[in-house]
Amino acid sequence: MRLILLGAPGVGKGTQAKKIASEFNIPHVSTGDILRTEISNGSMLGKKAEEFVSSGKLVPDEIILGMIKEEFKTDRFKDGFLMDGFPRTLEQAVKFSELLEELNINLDKVINIVVDEKEIIKRIINRIICSGCKKVFKLSDFENDDLICNVCGSKLTKRKDDSEEVIKNRLEVYKLQTEPLVDFYMGKGLIENIDGLGTENEIFERILARL
Ligand code: ADP
C-alpha cells in the first residue's frame, strides 16, 4: 500500500498515520517528526530547519526534497509507505511524482482528512505529545501536573509551534500552500475525502473502508 495523508495541522493525521501504518505494516514517514528529531539533536539539518518550524513557516522545498530523496535511496519503501506531512507544496508534489515515476512506483490513494478550522484550533491548543514515543494526548484529560505517557513513561510536552499565534500562521500556510494539493491529486483520481470528526476509531474505520 502506497499512501499519502493530507489535511490541515490538527486534523489527526499523525494519530491515523500510526494506525494505518501498523494495520498494513508499512513505514510511516512524518517529515514533522524527522525535523523535530533533527532539531532536538542539534544537527546541521535541524539548525537550518529550526527557525521555520518554530514560527510555523514551511521549511524550504529543497531541504525537504533532499531529506525525502535520501530516504528513498534505501529499499525501505519497496513494499509500501505512508507519507504524513509530505508533500506540502505543489513543488514538493510535482518533484515527488517525478521521483516515484523514476522508481516505477504508483501511489494507491491520497487520504484527505477534513475538519473545520474552529475545531482544529481547539484541538491543537489542547494537545500534548509524548517526548518519547510521540503519542498524542489531550491536556484536558489530566487533572494534575503529572504529565507522563501511559505507554512509555516519558514526559508529555507541548510542541513549541502549538501556541495560538503560531497555529494561525500554520493554518494560513496550509490554505495557501498545501490545500492546492487536493486538486492536484484529484486530477490524478487519487483523492479520498474523510470526515475527521468523531472518535479515533470511527475515523480509522472510515479510512479503512476507502482503502
Ligand atoms: P502539523 O501538520 O501539525 O503542522 P507537522 O509535524 O507535520 O505538523 O509539521 C511541523 C512543522 O514542520 C511545519 O509547520 C513545518 O515548519 C515543518 N514541515 C513538516 N513537513 C514539511 C514539509 N513537507 N515541507 C515543509 N515544511 C515541513
Image (spheres, rainbow, N blue to C red):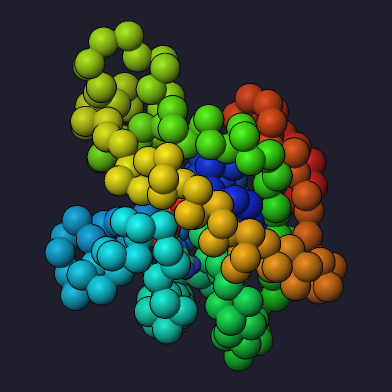
The quarter of the picture showing ligand 1: bottom left
User: Residue at left 46%, top 60%?
Assistant: 29
**In this view of the protein, which residue sits in the foreground, 190 or 104?**
190
Above or below, comparing residue 23 to residue 95 in the picture: above
Residues 106 and 177: in front is: 177
Give percent across and percent down for residue 125: 44, 32
Residue 165 x/y as whole percent: 41, 45
Using the rendered view, name the quadrant where residue 12 is placed.
top right
Q: Who's the residue at 42% across and 64% down the image?
A: 57
| Quadrant of the frame with the N terminus | bottom right
Q: Give the side of residue 37 with respect to residue 91, left or right.
A: left
Q: Is residue 48 visible?
A: yes
Quarter holding residue 80: bottom right
Picture layout, residue 206 above or below residue 99: above
Q: Is residue 93 left or right of residue 85?
A: right
Q: Give the percent coordinates (x, y) of residue 33.
A: 37, 55
Q: How many marks?
A: 0
Q: Residue at x 83, y 73 (%)?
A: 187
